[in-house]
Amino acid sequence: MATRTIITDEDPLLRKRSREVIEIDDRIREICADMVETLHATDNGIGLAAPQVGILKRIFVVDMYDDNGPIVFINPEIIEKKGKQRNQEGCLSVPGSWGEVERPARIKVRARNPHGELFEMEASELLATCICHENDHLDGVLFTDKVIGELVTE
């Protein structure tokens, strides 16, 4: 495992659409493990998408630092959205900036894990926000594109 460099919003790679993972092999599992290690090396991150470490693959990891531990999503699809919520969001690729973003209050997501197994999970509140935020990265969308009002920068 290795800690990878997180690219920032000046990098045009963050604006590109990621490609579907065709085969979940040892290389993909290594990327997933590196992403978890990279996320854990940050001061305050709870999610990290592959484009943020320079890889245009449809992969992201989330860790709410609870009993569930890190969750790896490969080829995720948000298959259900309900309600609305607004939260302050930041991003490891846009350091020092925050803004209010509206997201679904509840979602259902389908993805594969590093063993290739298909899973579905429901999420609400902060976890739903995080999954939607990371999923946006896979389509080249940053939270700054969705900020309501002003972006706050320190």
Image (tube, rainbow, N blue to C red):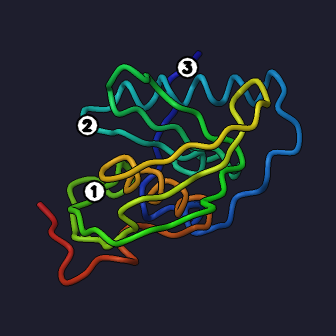
CB atoms of marks 1 and 2 within 8 Å: yes
Up-down: is 143 above or below 26?
below
Residue where numbered disc 2 is placed = 44
Say if 69 sits above or below 148 in the image: above
Q: Please identify, in this view, whether the residue under mark 2 or under mark 3 is nearer the observer.
A: 2
Indicate the amino acid at tag 1: Gly
Closer to the camera, 118 or 141? 118
Name the mark on residue 136: none
- Residue at image position (25%, 37%) is 44
Query: Is residue 107 or residue 143 the one in the foreground?
Result: 107
- Above or below, 8 against 24 in this view is below
Q: Nearer the viewer, residue 65 or 59?
A: 65
Residue 2: numbered disc:
3
Asked where in the image residue 29 lies, by quadrant, the reply is top right
Residue flagged by tag 2: what amino acid is it? Asn
Task: Give the side of residue 96 with respect to residue 24, left or right.
Answer: left
> Percent from the top left, x then y, of residue 107?
48, 58
In the rendered structure, which disc, 1 or 2, sits on the residue that comes first in sequence?
Answer: 2
Where is mark 1, residue-wise?
Answer: 90
* SS for dot 3: loop
The answer to which of marks 2 and 3 sits earlier in the sequence is: 3
Q: Are marks 1 and 3 in contact (CB under 8 Å)?
A: no
Position of 116 with respect to 89 (left or right) is right
At horizontal 54% and vertical 47% (from top left) the residue drawn is 49
Mark 1 closeness class: few <14, some 14–19, many ≥20 residues within 10 Å: many
The x, y position of residue 25, in whole percent, is 84, 26
Say which element carries label 1: strand
